[in-house]
Amino acid sequence: MLALYNNHLYLADPVTGNQNTDTNTDILMSVDLGALNPNVMLNTIPTIIGPIQGLGQVNNYVDGMEILPDGTLYTVDGTDDHLYRVSLTTGAILEVMDNNIPGGIDPLADVETIVWDPVNSKLIGADNQLQQFVDLTLDGTNGNNLVTSPYIGTPGIYSLVDFEGSAMYVMCCNLTVNSAIPSACDVNGQYTLSVDVTYTNISGDITINGQTFTPSGVTGRDTFVLTLLTANGAIDVDVTAQSVTEVTCSATLADAYDAPASCVWNRSAITSTDVLMQRYTDGTATVTASGNTSLLLIYGAT
């Protein structure tokens, strides 16, 4: 079985290949796609990560594996149809997600492939023994999973079909930054920025110019407010929205806005008569003087 993540191809090596009767522990391996030689005959063997075992469990025959956008690896064991969460870095079993308890995967099942549904945040498995799809909700209750829909029937799939692989087709994540509206400078020399973002099929949080926000749904339109921005008078500031879990899903509104000028005014070491002017749009002005001073302050609207 194969899965792709972070420019690495991950493989599970069935040590003997006896599928449902295998008693040997499978090995997790990886291949760095960036280091591949164009001549396939010159490529080295995959890097061994480690045996898929832990918590008193072993994965004897990896019949299905899937890596989520955040790097979480799941494998399903063809010998007993246990579903595991596995470490990408060591191969260790970190959690038993399904252990053939009532409500989970039937112990007579033969789940040979699993695939991640990013829109509904669940795994879908194909059971070739009972001819049905299995909905794996991954809610942490070790077996609280549902059979979603049998695939026997007309115009269904022939009952003797044997699925060996799967892929999930969904609309890609998409982001659009519609507008960015800054507030005025406050008394601390800072401002807020209201950013209007439209999104579809988003999975997880969104970052906007380094600040993180949670969308109100999978598809929709929200206004996110960035705070504690320094008023520095910068012009033509770009605004970039980025999905946290999908690195290829981002959008930038170039020259989105001009930052307000600083409204904090400091003047020191005045040794002669000066005429000072500072224009404010709102807020307050605080003047502190010491020594031999003569100060005339005119503060008002212009």
Image (cartoon, rainbow, N blue to C red):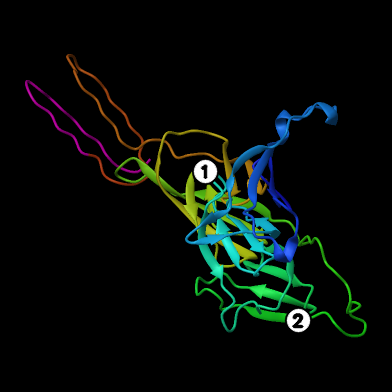
Q: Position of residue 177 (x, y in %)?
A: 63, 51
Asked whether residue 285 is in view, the answer is yes
Report the residue that reaches farthest toward the top.
272
- Residue at point 71%, 52% (across, down): 14
- Quadrant of the snapshot with the C terminus: top left
User: What distance separates the C-alpha of mark 2 from that of mark 1?
Assistant: 43 Å
Report the magenta residues as a range: 286-302
- First in residue order: circle 2 vs circle 1: 2
In the picture shown, does residue 134 fall above or below 41? below
Residue type at the position of mark 1 = Asn
Q: Main secondary structure of the magenta part?
A: loop
Task: State the residue in front, 291 or 45.
Answer: 45
Q: Is residue 301 magenta?
A: yes
Residue 209 shows which numbered tag? 1
Q: Position of residue 35 (x, y in %)?
A: 71, 29
Classify mark 1: helix, strand or loop.
loop
Residue type at the position of mark 2 = Ser
Q: Nearer the viewer, mark 2 or mark 1?
A: 2
In the picture shown, does residue 246 fall above or below 135? above
Does 235 sit left or right of 251 as displayed?
left
Q: Is residue 291 magenta?
A: yes
Asked whether residue 184 is in view, the answer is no
Residue 149 shows which numbered tag? 2
- Residue at point 35%, 43% (across, down): 301
Q: Position of residue 247 (x, y in %)?
A: 63, 46
- Residue at point 31%, 29% (across, down): 277
In the picture shown, does residue 27 fall above or below 255? below
Task: State the residue in front, 188 or 202.
Answer: 202
Q: Position of residue 262 (x, y in %)?
A: 37, 35
